[in-house]
Amino acid sequence: MSTAAVRTRAKNEIDIPSLVHHIREVNKQAVRIASTPPADSKGLKPRARRELVVVLNELEKTLKTLRIATADVQSVPNRVQTSVTAKPAAKQVTAALVLDTTEAMIEKGQLLTPVEFQRLMGWASRQAVWKAAKTHRVFYLTHQAERYFPAFYGDARYDRSHLEAVTKVLGDLPGGAKLQFFLTRKGSLGGSTPLDALADGRFAKVKDVAAAFAEVSTEA
């Protein structure tokens, strides 16, 4: 490989350790700013405050994207130690989601705001999001007066039409109950979660299990 090619390759490679170092340095400064007494913080010029707000909004969007992209990092050691395939590793991560609180799932990018969800789904307007929710094609959870949608609707491992069809079967159940259904292992699915079963192509079986779940939940 030529010297020029080596330099080009090195330039294009992502220096993760350096990125982590910079993030930590930024975080230290952010902590100092957050610790500044309110009276002092008001001394910031209006333009500086506006720029800070804009940058923070951009940072939040980037963090959401990074969390989604690195959601399965914790499963890497399991894949190495047990020599399992990629799909079982994904099942371990998905099953663990049900153990998280709503706040934790939001922090990890597993639950998205309407704007983030619209962008993830590639829909043209916010109205498309609410229409999909109203017709039970997708669902949301409410946390601190805000609505959040599951990011798995945009996951390429699942057929979106199958996810929407199963969600419709769950009908008027609360968002929390629907999330529990998708992320909880079922004996009727051989110990898989409905999401895992959908990834494996067992759409018809998942629909049947969803119908039974909705019926029992409604009767209760």
Image (spheres, grey):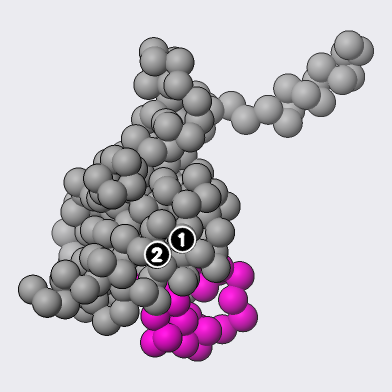
| Residue 105, x across and y down, in percent | 29, 53
Instruction: Please provide the residue range marked out in magenta.
Output: 116-140
Measure how far apart labels 2 and 1 are at the Cα level.
5 Å
| 34 is within the stretch colored magenta | no
The residue singled out by tag 2 in the image is 207
Residue 208 percent location from the top left of the image:
36, 64
Three-letter code for the amino acid on which mark 2 is drawn = Lys
Residue 26 placed where, x, y %? 40, 41
Q: Is residue 17 left or right of residue 106?
A: right
Q: Residue at x 59, y 27 (%)?
A: 15
Q: Can you see residue 154?
A: yes
Asked whether 92 or 76 is in front, the reply is 92
- Identify the secondary structure beneath mark 2: helix
Q: Quadrant of the N terminus?
A: top right
- Reading the image, the residue beneath label 1 is 204
Specify the quadrant that holds the C terminus.
bottom left
Residue at x 27% of width, y 59% of height: 181
Q: Is residue 60 visible?
A: no
Sort mark 1 into few (<14), some (14-19) or many (20+) by Cα contacts within 10 Å. few
Mark 1 lies on a secondary structure that is helix
- Residue at 74% across / 28% down in the picture? 11
Q: Residues within 10 Å of mark 2 (few under 14, many from 20)?
A: many
User: Marks 2 and 1: CB-CB under 8 Å?
Assistant: yes
Left-right relation of 202 to 28: right
Up-down: is 119 above or below 10?
below
Q: Amino acid at mark 1?
A: Ala
